Image: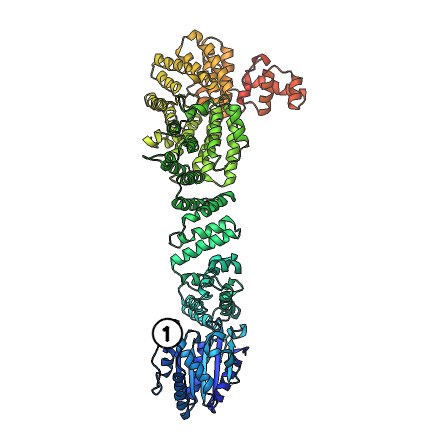
Amino acid sequence: MTQAGRASVAGALETVLATCTVGRSRVVLIEGAAGCGKSHLLNAVAERAVAAGALVLTAAATEAGRRVPLGVLRQLVGSAPPFALPRTGAEDAKPTREAMRTFCAELCDLALAGPVVLCLDDVQHADAQSLHHLGYLVRHARPAPVLVVGTVSSYVDAAQEPLCAPELTRQPHFRRIRIGLLSAGETAEVPAARPWEWPGPARTGRTAAELHRITGGNPLLLHALLEEDRAASASPPPAPAFDGPFATAVAACLRRSGPGAPAAGRAVAILAQRATEPLVARMLGPEDDAAAALAALRACGLLDGLRFRHPAVPAAVLADASPRARADLQRRAALVLTAAGAPADVVADHLLAPRADGARVPVRPEDFTLLTDTAEGLLAQRPGEHRTDQAERLLELAHGVCPDEAARTGVALRLAQIAARRDPEAAERRLTALVTGPRSAVSAVGAEHRSRPAGMLLAQGRIAESAALLREADEPGAHGGTPFDALLDTSVAGREEVPGSARLTDATLAPLVLAVRTLLYSDRPERAVPASRRLLEEAEVSGAPGWRAVFATLHAEALLRVGDVRGAHARATEALEALPAGGGGTFRYAPVAVLVEACGALGRYEEAAGHIRYPVTRRVLNTLYGLQYLRARGLHHLDLGRPQAALADFRRVGRQLQLWRADRAACLPWRTDAAQALLRLGKIRQARELAEEQLALPDGGRPWVRGQCLRLLAATGEPGRRIELLRQAVEQLRCSGSRLETARALADLGHALHADGGLSQGAATLRAAWSLAQRMGAVALRDELLPGSGGVALVHGTAMPEELTDSERRVAALAAQGLTNRQIAARLFVTASTVEQHLTSVYRKLGVPGRGGLPADLADGVPVTG
């Protein structure tokens, strides 16, 4: 029978005890889940029996004592008169019928003096020989006043226990009482001295509903929770502690719910919200009955369906296992969830959970595919710093268990790619570990695997290392040239499509960086501006700070090359802010180089001085970034009137480029830089020789390089040729798209024209230079042209002209190209009258008599913004 409540249970036990007292034999089996009060009820029966004058014999079976023959029987008769117990035989030996008859007769003789009550707790753990004796007793002691009361857990198959054999349970003197969890009403009261007596409401800071929700009505859990709440003396009470009474009670319920219950409980705790019976069954294995184990956990109130009732419960369930056991569980959970199609982030959390638990992740070589696939799945999700870190850790585990050298190298390369998401320095370290050493991993797997790391090295500015790796692989283009030469000499048409269409990923990062650099060093560097801006926007969306730093720097370099010094300063600052504190490695020198040069053009010399504190170590000097920084530092020395220090930096850049066989002025024009320093030192002949040498080299025909060379030759050559050389320099620099260099050449041309007597032309040219410098924010150059500031006045001390508006500049630029007012009006979608008004204002501001006095380079004043 099943009793509905504690009151009916108490009444049933009282009736059975009274029946025995008047001389009738009875057998009662109290069945229930762990913690539901079976032992309390058994103790209450014993107390009432003693009070009624009965002889009470007690025993408590344990799992550890199951292998002790007659162990339970000896407990029962230990305090009674001597019994003629048989000698113990083998553990599984069945006692003789004579031995069982003797024991029964002796106990019945003992009952002649008054009722005898045998109280046996946890029948399911009793040894086999004791159970055989007790089974014989309950079948043959009916005339005597003998009461046998036992408790058994509900998970036990009673039909297989001798004390509960089917032929016995059908007898009228046998009674089974099943007790369940407390109802909500019963939970609202606190247990008194008797299990079936419940006094007033519980004195706790928790509501009755909360108590029932947390404990499920399990008395053991309820008492433990109340005890913990009383000890805490806080209102409201805190969550149960992981090592407090409640957690201890949870562990006890788990252990007492059957052999499969602990494993099932841990599986549910590990799987959490994704727990299903099929997944739990796969976690437990074929030898365990998952359904029965889960039913036992529900019966004791730990589970509500497949969810624990309170977060403290799964924590206690897992705390009862060792860190190693928990780690193995996490690995098994990852395997079954992967087979069930769970998302990569869920699987990754399980694979990496042992680290957070302080245990080693128990991966094996057969887990290699699981680890790599999960890592790639993480990276395919919306990027984020947390997921990137997880993917790296998974690949590190895969790298550690992979026996195949080629696969290990592939994982190492992948790790270098992923590290670039968070910090270029991390990517640099990983790639260095891969390609250096007496027997690098890349060398070990053959030449066919070297082109990818070579491209990554080149994208990191490590020109010499990239070339060396390709020479080992005997790659085309490695002999007689370097990958850097290929980068600068690649067709721009082919490169321009790459950054404009390719999506930014780990695999495309290096090719995209190289494609933007090809555009940057080409004859049309302005095309690098939109390309780098698009990739920067994509990097910002990706949430990868390392990518943001890289493309913000490239965008800053592109803006600086075309003359937008304000934009270059802003983007370089943004790149530095994207780098982790103290991170960036040698890459940090690239945005710093842009900042120093931009600060010089902006006239912010103190700010620039704050950025040149970085040391130039051998490691830094072996990268393109270090050379860019050295050049920028040299330009800063020039700005501050220190030509000797500047010359040392420029020559150091040149020596390193020549050592690499990568002496390309399209990237680092160190000769023209050094020539400027030599001019300041009065070494005109050496300056001219460097400029002429630069013109004779392959990049001497590029407009940006040629324009700078011609400007220097004009400063070092005969005065008669100066104006012509400067005109050519202006034209070349205008074609190169470098507005800053164009403004400098215009300033030199204006001065030369002014000195040659061409006052009007000189003034107009200087005005154009000033206007262009103003538009770009090149404060240093603009201030040099201001009257009264130590520079040259535009027209004999007259004030500077008013700045043109954007509308006036557009009209003037078209007029300077020869378009009529009507054509300009049609082009700009305005009236001819509006065009005339703008032109009148332009003539007044520029001090020119009409169209013939308009500078041809007015369009150069339109800034290129980031």
Residue 711: x and y, percent?
A: 44, 15
Count of labels shown? Answer: 1
Q: Residue furthest bottom?
A: 113
Viewer can see residue 469: yes
Indicate the quadrant where residue 714 lies: top left
Q: Examine the rendered structure and indicate whether residue 173 appears above or below residue 715.
A: below
- Where disc 1 sits, the SS reads loop
Viewer can see residue 866: no
Q: Examine the rendered structure and indicate whether residue 237 appears above or below residue 109.
A: above
Q: Which residue lies furthest to the top in this view?
A: 720
Q: Which color scheme did the rendering employ for the protein?
A: rainbow
Q: Which of 710 and 779 is in front in this view?
A: 710
Q: Nearer the viewer, residue 337 or 798?
A: 337
Find disc 1 in the rendering and name its residue. Answer: 91
Q: How crowded is mark 1: few (under 14 residues within 10 Å), some or many (20 or more)?
A: some
Residue 519: x and y, percent?
A: 49, 25
Amino acid type, callout 1 = Glu
Residue 623: x and y, percent?
A: 37, 29
Residue 616: x and y, percent?
A: 33, 30
Indicate the quadrant where residue 589 lies: top left
Q: Nearer the viewer, residue 777 or 579?
A: 579
Q: Examine the rendered structure and indicate whether residue 147 appears above or below residue 856.
A: below
Q: In which quarter of the image is the N terminus?
A: bottom right
